[in-house]
Image (tube, rainbow, N blue to C red):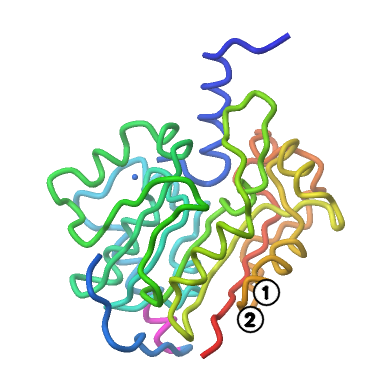
Amino acid sequence: MNAPRPFIAALLTVWIAACGRQEPAATPPAEAPATSAASAAASGTDIRALLTKPGRFASDAAEDAWRRSPEVLAFLQVQPGMHVLDYLAGGGYYSELLSGVVGPEGRVYAYNNPEYAKYSGDVPAKRYADQRLSNVTQLDGAPEALTLDPASLDAALFVQSYHDLYWHPKDGSWTPTDPAQSLARVVAALRPGAVVVVMDHVATAGSDPAASVDALHRIDPAVVKRDFEAAGLVFDAENPLFQNPADDHTKAVFDESIRHRTDQFMYRFRKPS
């Protein structure tokens, strides 16, 4: 028996939050800004200052503890002047922080497909109203049709969203996507030397992503590494920040006993120079 559509909508709203998105072309510089361990650490310090910025959404502040955004964005090595893609940005928690880091000379592209946009509600409209974040450009459309200028990005961020490219729900609430074609669009837009950070919920090793995503919204890290390397990126580093040995990988990520405490991997890839 099919679930009532209001129930499906409510469930998908929970899904967006559980996947990490509860909430919302300029000419690039000739060369990507330089990165280093020191500059990455400085970037983390800048993020901590942004967390207390006046006018920040209370709903964003409520998520800071479990998101650990200073460490995430330091791992991304984001710097002033960069052009950065926030992939399936939802309501824009990370888009706003990225906006503050890249500054007026930089640009953030907050991309949502129709499903992420729908279940983010009115948060993006509020976040970007009246040029509140004038260096953020909203992008929409199907992942396989995402249009970005070639070699225009210094970095891209996937926060608990890549697994959804494998999601094929039987109720039709998510349009099936092709991960390889979708990722190819992003890689073509990266400059040589650009970085991509992917963090997601860990599935049991060897599990079929179609099954693990549909049942649990988890993905085997080996699948992610395989996909991103096949797309032409080089594995650069792993950060253990969100590892949780107490998570046995059998629960759905929105299960209250594990929500916001799932075992997660965080990988950094780089486009060859």
Disc assigned to residue 97 = none
Residue 226, image quadrant: bottom right
The residue lying toward the viewer, choosing from 197 and 112, is 112
For the residue marked with disc 1, what is the amino acid? Glu
Residue 219 percent coordinates (x, y): 72, 52
For the residue marked with disc 2, what is the amino acid? Val
The boundaries of the magenta stretch are: 38-43
Vertical comparison of 118 with 219: above or below: above
Q: Residue furthest right?
A: 206
Quick one: SS at disc 2? strand
Residue 92 percent coordinates (x, y): 37, 49
Distance between mark 2 and mark 1 Cα atoms: 6 Å
Mark 2 in CB contact with mark 1 (< 8 angstroms): yes
Magenta stretch holds residue 166: no
Quick one: SS at disc 1? helix
The residue lying toward the viewer, choosing from 255 and 198, is 198
Q: Which residue is mark 1?
A: 229
Callout 1: 10 Å neighbours few (<14), some, many (20+)? some
Magenta stretch holds residue 41: yes
Vertical comparison of 202 with 210: above or below: below
Vertical comparison of 118 with 110: above or below: above
Which residue corresponds to the image point at 79% horizontal and 41% vertical from the top-left?
211
Callout 2: 10 Å neighbours few (<14), some, many (20+)? some
N-term mark: 2 or 1 = 1
Residue 188 percent coordinates (x, y): 48, 72
Q: Which residue is mark 2?
A: 234
Prevalent SS, magenta region: helix
